[in-house]
Image: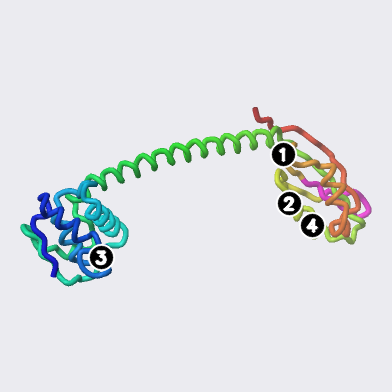
Amino acid sequence: MAAFPNVNSDSGLKKLDEHLLTRSYITGYQASKDDITVFTALAKPPTSQYVNASRWYNHINALLRISGVSAEGSGVIVEGSAPVAEEAVATPPAADSKDAADEEDDDDVDLFGEETEEEKKAAEERAASVKASTKKKESGKSSVLIDIKPWDDETDMKKLEEAVRSIQMEGLFWGASKLVPVGYGIKKLQIMCTIVDDLVSVDTMIEEQLTVEPINEFVQSCDIVAFNKICEFH
C-alpha cells in the first residue's frame, strides 16, 4: 500500500513526483481508485516543476473526461485526505477540473458559434441561389390549348387521353379536356395544359412525344389551337 504526506505541500508533491518517476500510476499498471484518491487530494494541478506528477495528473484528468476509471487498486493513504467517493471514479472532481472544464466549455461555445454563423451564411447563399434559379427558370408561364386527333372512329379515346396525360416533365401541367366531334363519328381530344416557358417547348413535345411510339398508336396528329402567356415573374 502506497502512502503519501500532504500532497498539497512541497514535501508531499516531491514525494509524489519521485514515486511517479518510474510509474505511470499510483499502484499497478492501470488507472485505479488509488489514482483517484491522490487526484482528489490535490487542491490544484502540480506545477511543471514536478514533471512526473504533472504528467500523471493530466493523464488521469483526461481519463476521467473520456472514459472514467473503474479499477479498484491495491490501496493508498494520503495524509489529510478523505476516502474517495464511488461517483468520483467515473467523473472528475468539480473543484480540481473546474478551470479546465470551463476553458473547454468556452472553447466549445466559441466553436459552435462560429459553425452556426458559417452554416447560416451557407444556408442564406443556398437559398439565394435556389431563389435566383427558380426565378430564372420560371420566367413566364403560358396556357396552351391542343387538338389531338385519333386515327379513326374506332380509336379508344379514353386510352388516348391516358396516353397523353402520361407525358410528365418539369414545368408541364395538364388541365381540363373534352371530346369535340369532327365528323363521320370521329371525335378529337381538346386538352388544356400550362407550361413554364423556359422549361417546356410544346412543339418539341408534339414532335418527340405525342406523335411517336407508343402514343402514336392512338394519335394521328396534333395542332396548337391557342397559346396565351398567363404569367410573368420579375
Marks 3/2: CA–CA distance: 67 Å
Residue 196: which numbered mark, if any? 1
Residue 168: which numbered mark, if any? 2
Name which residue lies at 20% across and 64% down. 26
Give residue 168's position: percent from left, percent from top.
73, 51
Q: Do the residues labelled 3 and 2 touch (CB within 8 Å)?
A: no
Q: Quadrant of the C terminus?
A: top right
Give the label, 4 or 2, closer to the camera: 2
In the rendered image, the vertical position of residue 136 relative to residue 95, given as above or below: above
Between 207 and 149, the one lying in front of the other is: 207
Q: What stretch is highlighted in magenta?
A: 180-191
Name which residue lies at 92% across and 57% down. 152
Give the label, 4 or 1, closer to the camera: 1
- Mark 3 — residue? 31
Give the residue at the far right of this rendering. Answer: 184
Name which residue lies at 73% across and 49% down. 169
Q: Circle 3: is it few (<14), some (14-19), or many (20+) Cα within 10 Å? A: many
Magenta-colored segment: predominant secondary structure: strand
- Mark 4 — residue? 163
